[in-house]
Image (tube, rainbow, N blue to C red):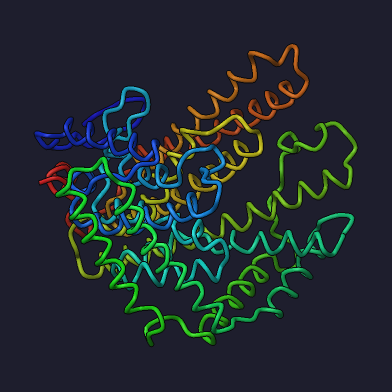
Amino acid sequence: MITTNGAQGYLANLPPNYEKIREIGRLVSDTIGSKRVSQPDHIALVLGQDAVLSYYFVDTLFHNIENGGPFPSYKRRNETALLEHSFSAAFGPYFRYLDQVIASHFFPTPREMRGGLVHDGPEEFGKSLLGALVAIDSIEHVLGKEIGYDADTETNKNALLLGPLESRLERMRVPIIDHNSTYKAFTSLRDEVKVKLENLQEQYVRVLKSLTSFRTYIEQKVDYMPAPQKQYLLQIMNTLIDKTQRLVGSRQALRTGETKHLVKSQYSHVIDIIGEGRFYPPIDRRLLLSGNPNDKMTDEMRSEEFLLSLKLLLHRDYIKQIARRVMTEAREYAKRRLDGDGYLANAMIKLSEFAHNARTMDTIPTHARSIFLKGAINVEEFAAVSADLRNLGLDSKRLGIGIDWAYRSMNLGLTNGYSHFKRSADTDTAAQKALDLFHAMREGMGNLEDIVASVLTAKPKNSTTKQPVNDKSGELLHA
């Protein structure tokens, strides 16, 4: 066993070429950062051959977003490439397994790597619930049912309704954003849902055009890749295009009635969550940015407080949905006495992508606050999943390690932010307010520390399945 920073991990049977894999992984990351296209043999070595199609499908979607307009730019709020985050979500745990700063102590499974690649695709490319549903459907039909299922699970459909909500509230010109105005806005948005055939087809055509455009880009612009690898990449693109072409306009694609039902059902789900307004979580006033904690509450502060509470309520519901799917798979594992801990996939995908967000947290207060509050929910809900798994007699050790890694990544990000503002707080009023915010968030980490410690030290009940052979995971990934 490895014991570092309080976390216990598996001393994996590292493949002989482990450092070579890390070296190529770093090269892939640098290639993404320089807005170049990685060569297929590098992706196969780092993520496994089964992940190659998934990588280039996601590369295509993100290339369209970041380079499709007249002014190419990064679309993540910390000014890094979309693909860099997805690649880090997939490969980060492996790359940082023994990292001296923030070691993961676990290997991701091949399924988790593929899921990490596509986890952001539907939200980022779709930009709306309709677009996300089409992206998920495309992933399922082009890349397979399992990865489509994981893309669906990891897509935060609740969050995709917040943009329309804020636009509607702005049109309503309400003096204070509160439960009543939000309930009214969500209800009217649900009742106005329309899905036209041409709008639905347009979304599928967006996917197809992205693929054909990326193939053309590779043909014309990628002159730095070895010729055999470029030719292989073009074959990969042809495969993706052929599969997508068969889906567009076919009976397998989503239908207007079905899609309208899915969109309206999501609105109804959110309306049910907010209900009569009794379940909004309380907000520490030190986390509000419009005013000071001791100030009399203004309309602006009340609106900020409500919206923050609403977003946390919806995020917790999203994580609970992931948790329910994890437990559904886990019960099937227990029932059929299956080997391994494959039921952890969707939890580990979420924790891995969150760890990257937390570790690379920027110093913009609203961004850091969002990561902290979402991270607290992630830790709490997945700790509850860990307890449920132990009650079933199932292995949850890797989940506990993943929770700990997410926690330590968040702690690192908050510490860096606190240090940044502490250097200028004495002479900058805005910096002092940001410093107070980071101080409050660091205080909140103490409660999470106790939860993480309890997960890491908990013992499972009598096992009903064979334990996963985690010390072989490196061999499975890169045999």
User: Residue, x 52% and y 78% (percent of image)?
Assistant: 200
Quadrant of the rendered image containing residue 191: bottom right
Foreground of the two, 227 or 239: 227
User: Residue, x 42% and y 50% (percent of image)?
Assistant: 350
Q: Is residue 171 visible?
A: yes
Foreground of the two, 40 or 362: 40
- Up the image or down, 275 lies above or below 354; here it is below
User: Residue, x 48% and y 63% (percent of image)?
Assistant: 321
Residue 329 at x, y percent in the picture: 32, 65
- Up the image or down, 436 lies above or below 177; here it is above
Apparent side of residue 130 relative to residue 4 in the rendered image (left or right): right
Quadrant of the rendered image containing residue 143: bottom left
Apparent side of residue 69 relative to residue 161 in the rendered image (left or right): left
Residue 169 at x, y percent in the picture: 79, 61
User: Residue, x 32% and y 66% (percent of image)?
Assistant: 331
Furthest residue in direction front, as rendered: 220
Q: How many marks?
A: 0
Q: Is residue 45 visible?
A: no
Residue 434 at x, y percent in the picture: 69, 27
Residue 465 at x, y percent in the picture: 20, 59
The N terminus: image quadrant: top left
- Up the image or down, 296 lies above or below 58; here it is above
